[in-house]
Image: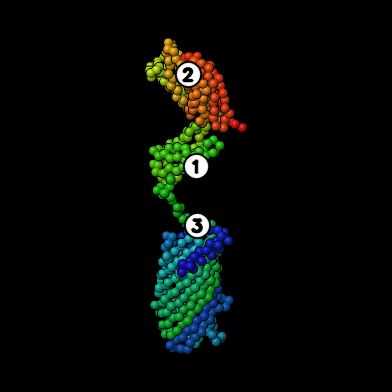
Amino acid sequence: MRLLAFVALISSSAFAQAIGGLHDDQWVTSRTFATFGAVVRQSNQAYTDGPPVEIKGGGPRLLAMHLSGAFFPRKFFGVGFGLRSDVVRANEVGQTDARPLPQQNVHGYATAVLRWQPALLFGLEGHLGWWGGSTALIRPTNPPTGDFLAMTGPVLGANLVFDPTSRFTAQLSGRVEVSMAQLTGFGVTLGAQARYGLVDLGPFELGLAVTFEFNGGEWRGMNVTKLNDAGLRLGIGPSLVSRRAAPPSVVTPATAPSLVGSVTRTGGTPVSGAIVTAGDRTTTTNVAGTFTLDGLPSGPVTVTASAPSLRPAVKQVIITPGVSVEVTLMLEAKTGPGSISGIVRAAPDKPLAGAKVTSGSTTVTTSATGQYALTKMGPGAVKVRVTLDGYTPADEVVQVAAEANAELDVTLELATQRSKAKIRGVVSSAAGPVAKATVRIVELKLKQTVKADGRFEAEVLGGKYTLIIEAAKHVTQTRVVEVADGDQAIFQIELEKVR
């Protein structure tokens, strides 16, 4: 059974794609068919009070009417109905000289319908209800006379419905009717029906339907010892179908992230490892520059992204429960000046107030705690001079990153003391500070590795010295310097890469 259902699903899917595609957003809520056409009937009738009679109906005056439909207030449950009426001119076989008698068979039913629809492509319906009707007889009198006997009882049926497109529908149906009235027995009805929608009328679609149906049964009662009755009908007529949109799938807040987004540089390059903060939640971007944050409360929230050497970006978003809010934050490269701050002291670690700290045209005075701050410095290597009456001036060079602060603490020595000279400077390249560069003072057999920002400093007695500056994959430089006691020599050395 499962294999047959799977084959039906695959076959109907291919058929639907061939004639216009699926319509997975709707399901049928009502359908009504009214068709009119031809009918051919035949019955064999046997009586307790006369000879058997064989009746055939046909000819140019035949007529068949068929009305059926279903209404589904729920996707899986509905009610169905049907009514057919056949009008024929009938003769007793072998009695060609007898006048044809008008015969009419009426049949109607009402059922409850359970619908199983695993996909909107096809469905299976089960019908259970009650039916009733009458069948025509020809009594073997002279001349023959017509009569009607009633039939009624339970009805059990099933429909296999193919619904591949919003306009085309086809169904195969079968019913078993049991009679417990004047005539008892049972009958079987088999049918096929197809429709195609033509015109939209608001909530309904008007279309054209074609119906083919066969019914037959065996009955007895009311001095009828046996009645075999069969009919074949074909009709065409209008149809009305209404549909309802299937409810959209809703992702619950528990499964939907509150915020998803990406962090990029100007130009669209993703930023990996950027820190993203929204409310009390913080995360970092992956190698693709994307991030996800869960559990944010509903309402407005500020989203901030930051990364080294880049300006932070800030955006306001509205968090909605069950919906993933998307945001993109763009970080621009820092290019503006930075600042320098620090403390000026006298040995041993005594803060100096009133010292002048000068860089270019900017001069500030240290506070009572020896602190100072220079703004709008750099970016790049910046020279700083510190002076105070009674102390030997100090000259420094510091590397200032764009829009960042560089810390520089300076120690001044009393001018009355004989102090050592200082040799200091910054080693860099066109790309910035050079990692693991070294400075050797040949005369002192002193070798010193420069700091991370490229600075180096050495205290020496007054005299003449040879400095050799080296770094891997860079051209070695040699400098000769002569410095007096208490004096300073400052260098800014730029190494070239080995070609």
Q: Nearer the viewer, residue 211 or 54?
A: 211
The correct choice, above or below, for 166 with respect to 350 in the image is below
Mark 1 and mark 2 lie on one chain; the one further toward the N terminus is: 1
User: Is mark 3 in CB contact (under 8 Å) with mark 1?
Assistant: no
Amino acid, disc 2: Val
Which image quarter holds the C terminus?
top right
Q: Secondary structure at mark 1?
A: loop
Q: Measuring 45% from the left and 40% from the top, which residue is drawn there?
A: 284
Position in image of residue 165 (x %, y %): 53, 60
Q: Measuring 38% from the left and 18% from the top, which residue is drawn there?
A: 348
With 155 as the anchor, is 54 left or right in this view? right
Q: Nearer the viewer, residue 75 or 94?
A: 75
Q: Measuring 48% from the left and 67% from the top, which residue is drawn there?
A: 3
- Determine the CA span between mark 3 and mark 1: 38 Å
* Mark drawn on residue 24: 3
Q: Nearer the viewer, residue 24 or 107?
A: 24
User: Is mark 2 in CB contact (under 8 Å) with mark 3?
Assistant: no
Within-10-Å neighbours for mark 1: few <14, some 14–19, many 20+: few
- Determine the CA span between mark 1 and mark 2: 50 Å
Q: Nearer the viewer, mark 1 or mark 2?
A: 2
Q: Nearer the viewer, mark 3 or mark 1?
A: 1
Q: Which residue is mark 1?
A: 287
Q: Nearer the viewer, residue 136 or 440?
A: 440
Mark 2 and mark 3 lie on one chain; the one further toward the N terminus is: 3
Q: Secondary structure at mark 3?
A: loop
Q: Which residue is mark 2?
A: 460
Which quarter of the figure has residue 234? bottom right
The correct choice, above or below, for 270 with respect to 157 in the image is above
